[in-house]
Each structure stands twice: as structure tokens, then as C-alpha cells.
Image: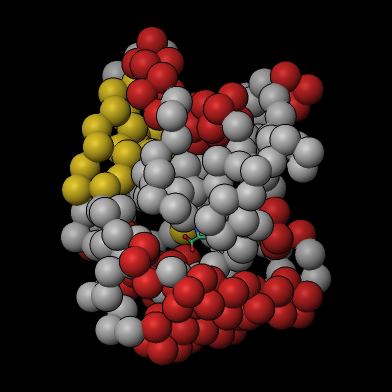
């Protein structure tokens, strides 16, 4: 472990401050519990890709993706700042957040497409089931669960083969500003020897951040190849694409 390895000093970066924030959509960052099959679909992951080498999942939230991959014989390191809080507090908050997320879907039906989930009850039940599987596997911070925050990951360069990041970047632009997005993408690229995948590319009101193309231009200048790839999963309406980044 190399705390803070490779990232620029925190003082040069900032998240959007509370005063500057214009809450939009879901508002606060919630801790979600997406089940393994949902994760696999939204990142369009084949069995070979799941088993080809260590995977970083940041933020890991309270979902059971890591448990699912470990059951297949693979390795996932999940990173989330919430893993630094006492387990019962964090699980209680995640259960509450799962209900908050479900309520947001019920109140904003035009923003969602039924299909992966049959209806809002199915959404709640499968997310809660994922959370309980996560809870059964989580025994506090350790080799598979690391408490840390983007844009600084406590890993050496190329520590994992593939880095996944879901429902933080691009989802909460009222919490993370442009520079934090750029620094976070660079940090994920630093720790991933082969590839970074980010999903979704829209926020909770289905908008794309206005500086999206600018971020890709900055990464291209770093020598990073970017591809926007369609995935076989749509839950937020129209959010069926992921960003794939590879070292040039
Ligand atoms: C909506 S959840 C997404 C979890 C999971 N990736 C998913 O798709 O279900 C957002 C998570 O981001 C975490 N988070 C907030 N700020 C973060 C940061 N700076 N770096 C990493 N994770 C962060 C929160 O603790 C929360 O668990």
C-alpha cells in the first residue's frame, strides 16, 4: 500500500463546496447496493474479463460485485470512503439510501426504463438482497475493502488490470467539479495496467457534464485512448453507454 501514491497534492484539487452546490436530481451522494448481475451488465463484463486479473471497483458502495467475482475465483478490491465507518452504521445508512434511491425512482418514473428491473418493487428487493450479500461478506476494511477517496488511491501504479467506476463520476457533478473528475480519471488510469471503465455517462437528471469532451481531450493529450461503448443495460433512460479508457 502506498497512501496517496501518484496523485497530485490535495490542495490543488477541490470538490464543489456546499456553498457552490446547486442540488440537482438525487442531491446527496447515496451508497447504493447494486447486485453482481447488474454490475456485470452495466460494464458488459464477460467471464474472461472478470477472471483475467485483479479488478478495482471504486466506489464499491454496498453492492456484492466483489463477492460475486470472488465466488468465481477472481479478485476484486473495492474502495469507498464509507468502509472507514463502523460496519453497522454504514450498513444502516446503506439500507436507508437504498430506500431513498427507490423513492427517487418512484417519484421520477420518466427518468427510468423498466426491463432489467421489472418494476420498482423488484428494484428495491434486488438492491436490498445485494446489500445483505455484501454485509455477509464484509468483515471491515481489509485486503478486499479499502477505505479511500478519489482522486487519491492508496495503490502503486498498475496494481490492478481493470478499474471500474460506477455512479460517482458524471452522476454527481454538483459534488465533484471538472478538475476532480479529471484527477480521478487520471488516478484510475494510474492504478489500472490495462483499462478503466466508467458508467454511466449521465447524471441523475439524465444530463451529461458540459466538460465531458474537454475531459476526453485532456486525456488524449496524456496519450489515453477513449471509447464510448454501448452496454446491454439501461436503467436510467438513455444511460446505456460506458466510457472505456486505455493507455495509448
Ligand atoms: C451511488 S454509490 C455507487 C456505488 C457503486 N459503484 C454502484 O454503482 O452501486 C456512490 C458511492 O460513492 C462513494 N464516494 C463518495 N465520494 C467518493 C470519493 N471521493 N471517492 C470514492 N468514492 C466516493 C460513496 O460513499 C458511495 O458509496
Relative to 198, 228 lies left or right: left
Q: Position of residue 156 (x, y in %)?
A: 58, 33
146 or 39, nearer to the observer: 39
Quadrant of the image containing the N terminus: top right
Please state the horizontal and vertical placement of residue 185, each as a whole percent of the image: 49, 32
The residue at the point 76 percent across, 79 percent down is: 88
At a point 78% along the width and 38% down the height, the residue shown is: 19
Q: Nearer the viewer, residue 68 or 235?
A: 235
Counting from the top left corner in percent of width and height, residue 148 is at: 69, 47
In the image, is residue 57 above or below residue 174?
below
- The residue shown at (24%, 37%) is 228
x, y (%) of residue 209?
45, 35
Tell me if residue 217 comes above or below residue 74 in the rendering: above
Q: Which residue is nearer to you in this view: 30 or 146?
A: 30
Q: Is residue 181 above or below residue 21?
A: above
The image quadrant where one finds ligand 1 is bottom right
Which quadrant holds residue 232?
Answer: bottom left
Q: Quadrant of residue 90?
A: bottom right
Residue drawn at the location 53% of the way across and 77% of the way down: 103
Q: Is residue 46 visible?
A: no
Q: Give the side of residue 238 with respect to residue 163, left or right.
A: left
Tell me the quarter of the image containing the C terminus. Answer: top left
Does residue 62 show up? yes
Amino acid at each position: 500500500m502506498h497512501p496517496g501514491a501518484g496523485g497530485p497534492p490535495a490542495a490543488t484539487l477541490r470538490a464543489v463546496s456546499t456553498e457552490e452546490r446547486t442540488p440537482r436530481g438525487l442531491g446527496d451522494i447515496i451508497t447504493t447496493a447494486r447486485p453482481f448481475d447488474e454490475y456485470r451488465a452495466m460494464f458488459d463484463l464477460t467471464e474472461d474479463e472478470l477472471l483475467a486479473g485483479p479488478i478495482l471497483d471504486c466506489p464499491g458502495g454496498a453492492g456484492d460485485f466483489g463477492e460475486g467475482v470472488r465466488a468465481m475465483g477472481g479478485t476484486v478490491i473495492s474502495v469507498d470512503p464509507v468502509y472507514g465507518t463502523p460496519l453497522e452504521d454504514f450498513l444502516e445508512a446503506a439500507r436507508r439510501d437504498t430506500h431513498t434511491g427507490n423513492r427517487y425512482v418512484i417519484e421520477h418514473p420518466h427518468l427510468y426504463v423498466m426491463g432489467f428491473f421489472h418494476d420498482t418493487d423488484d428494484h428495491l428487493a434486488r438492491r436490498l438482497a445485494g446489500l445483505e450479500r455484501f454485509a455477509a461478506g464484509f468483515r471491515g476494511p481489509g485486503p478486499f475493502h479499502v477505505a479511500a477517496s478519489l482522486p487519491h488511491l492508496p495503490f502503486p501504479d498498475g496494481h490492478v488490470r481493470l478499474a471500474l467506476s460506477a455512479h460517482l463520476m458524471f452522476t454527481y457533478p454538483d459534488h465533484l467539479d471538472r478538475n476532480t473528475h479529471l484527477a480521478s480519471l487520471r488516478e484510475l488510469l494510474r492504478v489500472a495496467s490495462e483499462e478503466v471503465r466508467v458508467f454511466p455517462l449521465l447524471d441523475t437528471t439524465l444530463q451529461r457534464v458540459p466538460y465531458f469532451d474537454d475531459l476526453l481531450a485532456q486525456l488524449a493529450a496524456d496519450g489515453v485512448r477513449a471509447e464510448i461503448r454501448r452496454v446491454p443495460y439501461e436503467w436510467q433512460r438513455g444511460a446505456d453507454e460506458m466510457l472505456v479508457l486505455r493507455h495509448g
